[in-house]
Amino acid sequence: MSEEKKWNIPDGEFCVYGTVYADPEHADEVEAVYKETTRLAQSEEGIVYYCLSRDGDDPTIFHFFERYKSKAAFDAHNQQDIIQKFIKSGWMKDVKAVFTKPITP
């Protein structure tokens, strides 16, 4: 998600959801990174919800749903070493992401 400039990130609290298409040779490494980022997200300030899953039909596809209190929280999450190394790894063939405001009561 290093190319966030192309994405329209809403002000304030927002959600991002989408799909990561992994290089088949590295899909298991992608899952290992996602296990660790999920663990880390549990204690990150500004993350409301963080969920990643591996597709049951195609193990090279990963789905994500994340909710942040702010763009600053999103940026802090993405600046972590594990995320930066993953972005630069070449293990992702493509990422489709949608940024949106959550529906609140």
Image (tube, rainbow, N blue to C red):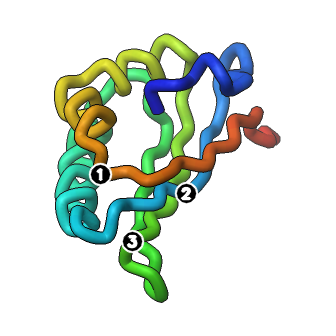
Task: Identify which amino acid the numbered label 3 is placed on.
Answer: Thr
Q: Nearer the viewer, mark 3 or mark 2?
A: 3
Of residues 37 and 8, the one drawn nearer to the viewer in this rendering: 8
Q: Amino acid at mark 2?
A: Thr
**Snapshot quadrant of residue 76:** top left
- The vertical placement of 66 against 61, above or below, is above
Residue 94 at x, y = what percent? 50, 51
**SS at circle 3:** loop
**Label 2: which secondary element:** strand
* Residue holding disc 2: 19
Task: Name the spot of residue 60 as percent of width and height, x first.
Answer: 39, 71
- Callout 2 crowding tier (Cα within 10 Å): few <14, some 14–19, many ≥20: some
Q: Label 3, on which residue? A: 60
Does residue 80 appear left or right of residue 54 in this picture? left
Which marked residue is nearer to the observer: mark 2 or mark 1? 1
Earlier sequence position, callout 1 versus callout 3:
3
Which residue bears the numbered disc 1? 91
Going from N to C along the chain, the mark reached first, 3 or 2, is 2
What amino acid type is highlighted by mark number 1?
Trp
Residue at position x 45%, y 68% in the image: 61
Residue 83 drawn above or below residue 55: above
Crowdedness of circle 1 by 10 Å Cα count: few (<14), some, many (20+)? Answer: some
Q: Residue 51 location in percent, x, y?
A: 44, 55
| Residue visible at 27% across and 33% down in the picture | 88
Quarter of the rendering containing residue 11: top right
